[in-house]
Amino acid sequence: MDSNMAMISAWSYGLAGLLAAFLALYLASGWRAGGRSRAMFLAVCLCALWGLLGMAFALTHQALFLAGNLLANPLRFGGWYLFLLVLMKPEPRENERASARFGWLGGVALLLVIVGFASQALAIVGVDLPVSASRVALFSSLAMSVFGLILLEQLYRNVSPDFRWSIKPMCLGLGGTFLFDLYLYSDALLFNQIDADAFSVRGFAHAVGLPLVALSAIRSHDWKRRLVMSQRAAVQSATLVIVGIYLLFMASAGYYVRLFGGEWGRALQLALLFAAMLVLVALTFSGSMRARLRVQIGKHFFSYRYDYREEWLRFTQTLSSQDGFSGMGRHAVRGLADMVESPGGALWLKDPSGRFFAQAACWNMPVSSATEDDGSALCRFLLDSGWVINLEEYRSLPRRYDGLTLPSWLVEVPNAWLVVPLTTGNELIAFVVLATARARIDVNWEVNDLLKTAGRQAGAFLGQMQASEALLEVRKFDSFNRMSAFVVHDLKNIVAQLSLMLKNAERHRDNPEFQKDMLMTVENSVERMRQLMLQLREGATPLEGPRGIDLADAVRRIQAAKSGQGREVEVVIEEKLVARGHEDRIERVIGHLVQNALEATEHGGRVWIRLARQGNNALVEVGDSGHGMSPEFVRERLFKPFQTTKPTGMGIGAYESFQYVHELGGKLSVDSAVDVGTQVELLLPLFDAGPAKDSADLPKEVQ
């Protein structure tokens, strides 16, 4: 055997011996679990001994190790025979015919092992027989391979259909090794010599079958009482086996490239090995390849695709690692996406007003400004059925979804695949749109149940977070109220001070010193009140109900007021409209938006107001070419109290405007970009006087 072939043999038998040794260590913990576990442990130990002796011979070329390998071969067959016979052992209640068949098979197995061991021993010592001992050894080895296949066939055919699922990987693994030995020994008997190449890679063929045997041990409840392997361990083991096969194949290819490459052989070998390692690294870090491997292993080697304990711990940890409400949404999306190998997704969360859903978080998916009304067909279907909508299935079989009509914005989402409802109690709090998976996944009942259950957990987390934020806002308002009480107390002191000064003014008004002191007191009081007023915001709710408001007049008054302050506001009135609301509050909302636009725009920049009709609503558009705001600030902070970009603001104005507009049944939306500008669209319901309304409630232009 030359050095290259010896190295291949060492790798081949060494891999088989080490894999068998590792499997034996796993099985050692189940020694007392029953005869089946002990029989399998014995067979695996004999395989490990056989492989390690073969590796020792390939490395040292010592005849002693070769003799040990040859003698261990029939013992290895005997170990697997014992294990298969133990699995086939009839129960005491079975008939005598089954017991007789079992006894006959056991006798043949014992005879073959004895003949095989004896013939190998005689061939090693060179004892002459009427027939060549070596040829008898080859014939007995061929017979043992055939008998092993017979036992596998008997086992698979006679077990119950439920148990076949458990033993199928083992039958494939052992059947493959027995078939390889059948080819090896039949070829040797035909040509009267062992094929050196086949003999060198024999250990590798046996090593490939061992992981399948291990998977059967995992599947079977009868002999896995202590041997427990998770899907993660199975994926890692399969990955190591695949990497080993790949490396052995590339090493063999490199050997032949160097052998037949002439003077370019070594250079071509190095280039091939470098390319092979580069491809291996790329595949190792490929998310798609890992996803496909997990899907295939879960589909073909486990009764359930998911390790639920592992999935639940990972999902709970993902949700618990949130950093704020927006971070919570991204983690919820990512946790659901990881369950189905999806590379991205987005979360649509119900608005605080409860009237529509808007995108609140996204992960590897474009930001969308689309909204979905709470009473739409999509939301009603998600809440009533609780189903996970498979968009691929919907396109091919829409009748399964009871006439559901998808909104246009959802159809246009790139790579949209699944829509997962997030519920808490009997309320749809959000839904997640997931992108198409990296690997092909059959969205069956198991995937649907897992996503629905995870969606309920994520919905509970989001609901709890919303409640926590609402409580925090209440506490902030409580702090604001306490601050107002302190301000009122200070104002009372100022009023008392000014009252005292007025009492003394009658007596000392001609005293120059008193006049000087009075001016200083007034100046100080004004400054103190100005500082106090900076801490407060107006906004008392009027007692009268909403009435018709002429928006054109309100816009012109705001324009005139800002012109008096030295700033110009462009006004475009496409149609005179009457909206429903309170005149002072509507004017204050629009004025607040205009004031924000002016403060964000340098002198020379544009600030405009446009008034137009949009359906049954009046559209008031306030825009500027100022500093603008980031999408994150608009989505997460703009309409929340105490959130502002102004160094001296308190973030009450935008929050109050948002709340009041939604109280009227309107809508306020913002489109902004940093260093580009901001455009705010205010939709207000048009005023419908009706027959019972008094004309005095209408503006003069309407009467």
Image: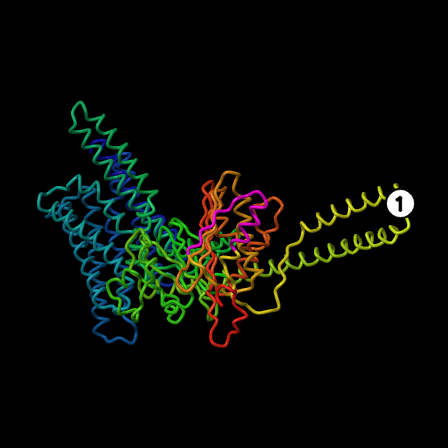
At label 1, counting other C-alpha atoms closer than 10 Å, the crowd grade (few under 14, some 14-19, many 20 or more) is: few
Q: Is 38 placed left or right of 357 in the picture? A: left
Does the magenta segment cover residue 133? no
Of 214 and 267, the residue lying toward us: 267
Give the magenta part as a residue range.
Answer: 555-574
**x and y, in percent, of residue 190 in the image:** 8, 46
**x and y, in percent, of residue 380 in the image:** 39, 69
Does the magenta segment cover residue 561? yes
Residue bearing mark 1? 510
Q: Amino acid at mark 1?
A: Asp
Image quarter where the N terminus lies is top left
**x and y, in percent, of residue 336 in the image:** 40, 57
Of 248 and 628, the residue lying toward us: 628
Q: Residue at x 36, y 50 (%)?
A: 343
**Whether residue 357 is situated above or below residue 194 in the rendered picture:** below
**Whether residue 372 is situated above or below residue 591 in the rendered picture:** below
- Label tally: 1
In the orientation shown, which residue stands out farthest toward the top?
Answer: 263
Answer whether residue 643 is visible to the viewer in this image: yes
Of 496 and 412, the residue lying toward us: 496
Label 1, secondary structure: give it: loop
**x and y, in percent, of residue 154 in the image:** 20, 64
Answer whether residue 36 is visible to the viewer in this image: no
In the orientation shown, which residue stands out farthest toward the left?
Answer: 190
Classify residue 452 by image quadrant.
bottom left
